[in-house]
Amino acid sequence: MATSLQLRSLKAELNGQLTQATLRLEGEARTGTQHLSLQTQATGGLSGPGQWQAQWSQLRAQWQDTRRPGVWTAQLTQPWAMSLRTGASPGTAVAPSARASSTASASPASKPQGLTLQASAGQAQITGPEPGTVALRWQPVRLTTVAGGGLPRLQTQGTLQGLPLAWVDAFGMDAAPTAAPSTAVPGAASTSPTAPTLAPQPLLARLGLATDLLLEGQWNVDTTESLRATASLRRTQGDLRILSAEPPAETTSVSTGQGLGPGSVTTITPASTAATSRGTPAGVRQAELSVQLDADSLNARLQWASARAGEIDATASTRLQWGADAAPWPADAPLAGSVRARLPDVGVWSALAPPGWRVRGTLDANATLSGTRNAPRWSGTLAADELAVRSLIDGVDLQGGRLRASLRGNQLELTEFQLQGGRGSKARIPGQSGNRTQAPTDRGSLSATGRLTWSDADTASGTPPRIAMDLQAQAQALQVLVRADRQVSVSGNLRAQLQEGQFSLTGKLTTDRATIILPDETAPTLDSDVVIRSAARDREAQARAQAAALAHQKAEQAPQLVPAKPAVIAITLNLGNDFALQGRGITTRLTGEVDVRSAATAGAPPRVTGEVRTEEGRYRAWGQVLDVETGLIRFNGPYNNPSLDILALRPNISVRAGVQVSGSALAPRVRLYSDPELPDAEKLAWVVLGRDATAGGAEAAVLQQAALVLLGRRGQSPTGNLASRVGLDEIGFKGAAPGEDANTAALTFGKRISKDLYLTYERTLSGTLGALYIFYDLSRNLTLRGQAGSNSAVDLIYTMKYD
């Protein structure tokens, strides 16, 4: 595809003769998004046959890619001289008689022509988009080429100082859309400035790092006799910071119309929010990388030492081959190396974890490298101790971890992995429908073994290395959740495999004990008709929208990573016999078993099949405590939309009345229930009052209970909340019977002792009479009632249902 080159504001002035001339040049060149600005002044000319020399007294160049913020600037800080000569290549012998003879009789083929470039010592400085200035110094340079090919002969050495590591952001930052230039009319005021555009997040920030490290380096290259080169880069000052999960400092790119021309982008970062002021310092003491090339032998070494970010000492060596038709680094090139790494505190990297998560532990690795480039072989050990993962918000507190692994050729074998659960939260739901056992004090354990293998790449067929994995894990009463309102411990086996590009996860888990307490209330929120306007929030929302659009565009353009085969998931989860749930008005134990299977369609959520049942459940509604007679949750598809079959009845009344829930979780159907079938008003009366609504004064009581429900929170009446706080199941009102004095109306207090035993105490409003009732269900239709108070009696009540 052809590219156009545009020259703007070009000014050139040449004075003198061919042997001595002065050149002044100033201008801009553009091609696509690349802008180059050059200012130079040089003197020079021909100094003899085939010889040319020049001296720069001024040289300044600026370069910018308009898709990225900032400008690169390089300029000489002292005059610099250069000479160029063409003629016989150095090392070509010429006989004395040939020198005396006429040059016209000499054949050009007998004197191969070459080019010799010599430059004096000099120095320059470089500035970039990120703060900092690099001082570049070099010794005299000599470059000789040989006509007809061959390795050029180069001699150069020099140093650089003050190189900021933060400059990697200028190269690792994704390109941002170019802002439209502002419109200006000569002699008129400028129009409104272009709206700020969100700058892409720098590379270091995406990695969770910030730094003010400064580096110095040196190089020495000499190819006159054989290929010899050395280069090194090391830290001189500064530190590395590991950022927290806080949002990065706000950075805005504004089209200013200055610098290299319209459309230039200037980055504005508030000094008060500089990245280097946040995060955890790593305490870097040493950071050095050195490379040495001697003929065909290449050696490299990396040394890193810090107080909190660990230590690394790695070496590597290989052999290169030089030839016109051969690759410099062949597939069968031998490899040799070693890695010694130690991280005394893994917790320093907790800032890179999701918000609220913390890790802890030590890591130690020792390995050696052998084999060839196409078939590397590793041998060594990997050890970690005191591993811990913690999130107070999620209730995860895994600790006491220990890992031992060994590297053998192309295999990593996990010989030992141990992890203990949390210390326990003592969470427990009391009562007949709650937990059967106390909260465990044993933390439980998780152990795992397995191996990871990879094959060598096949360069002939272009087949990349293949990875295979087989891991087995076993949990023994592992406490995976230890929050004050949630406690879960599980046991079982899991197996993770990767074969022929397909990942599979299989196993069976059983809940040993669980306590899940759901909040009956949530934080207050504003109504939908309340709108808050804020300029700061508007700018933040606009920035988020631009960032989301940029990320979406990048995701569409980037190649998608698609697994060769869809993952296979087959996990069976058994809820055990002590899985207690409380919240949203219900208290119950859950039993049953569900199977989690991967969906047939790639990318779809897993399918869940199975049935969960309630056991001795109770449901609080309209200020009453209902018994969950039938509680079935059937899964046969997506996990978030099971079918519901729930029937909750009020106990100890002559009519079966309550609430029935059917349909699905996403579309539930709730209705009043009675057996025999009654009008809804009478159903509500039986559920709320425990008697027929036609009894004297009952209509007012029904309305009172309904009002209490509407004024309560989440369907809970104030009386229901009060009852739960004092440890009762019911606090209600009993109206006067037909023909009796109104003073016989009474307050009732109820408490369920067991599934079949229920106690009720009544106290009249006048305070003169009180009675204690005991209900015991002998069967579904036969109930034994005992009464003590002004009248003492024992009744046997038989209930017959008919249509």
Image (cartoon, rainbow, N blue to C red):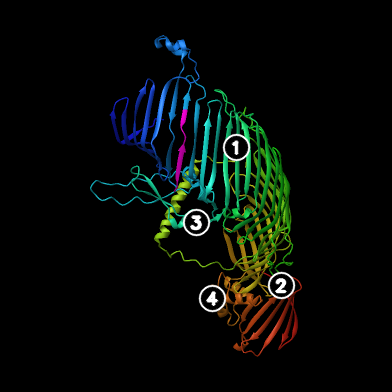
Q: What residue type is disc 3 on?
A: Ser
Mark nearer the viewer, 2 or 4 = 4
- Of the image marks 3 and 2, the number of the one nearer the N terminus: 3
Q: Which residue occupies the foreground of this view, 109 or 455?
A: 109
- Of the image marks 3 and 4, the number of the one nearer the N terminus: 3
Quarter of the image for residue 706 reads bottom right
Q: Secondary structure at mark 2?
A: loop
Quarter of the image for residue 44 reads top left
Residues marked 1 and 4 touching at CB (< 8 Å)? no
Label 3 sits on residue: 277
Label 2 sits on residue: 800
Residues marked 2 and 4 touching at CB (< 8 Å)? no
Quarter of the image for residue 233 reads top right
- Disc 2 crowd, CA 10 A, few/some/many (<14, 14-19, 20+): few
- Of the image marks 2 and 4, the number of the one nearer the N terminus: 4
The CA span between labels 2 and 1 is: 92 Å
State whether residue 302 is above or below residue 458: below
Mark nearer the viewer, 3 or 2 = 3
- Disc 1 crowd, CA 10 A, few/some/many (<14, 14-19, 20+): some
Q: What residue type is disc 2 on?
A: Met
- Of the image marks 1 and 4, the number of the one nearer the N terminus: 1
Q: What residue type is disc 4 on?
A: Ala
Q: Position of residue 281 (x, y in %)?
A: 56, 54
Label 1 sits on residue: 300
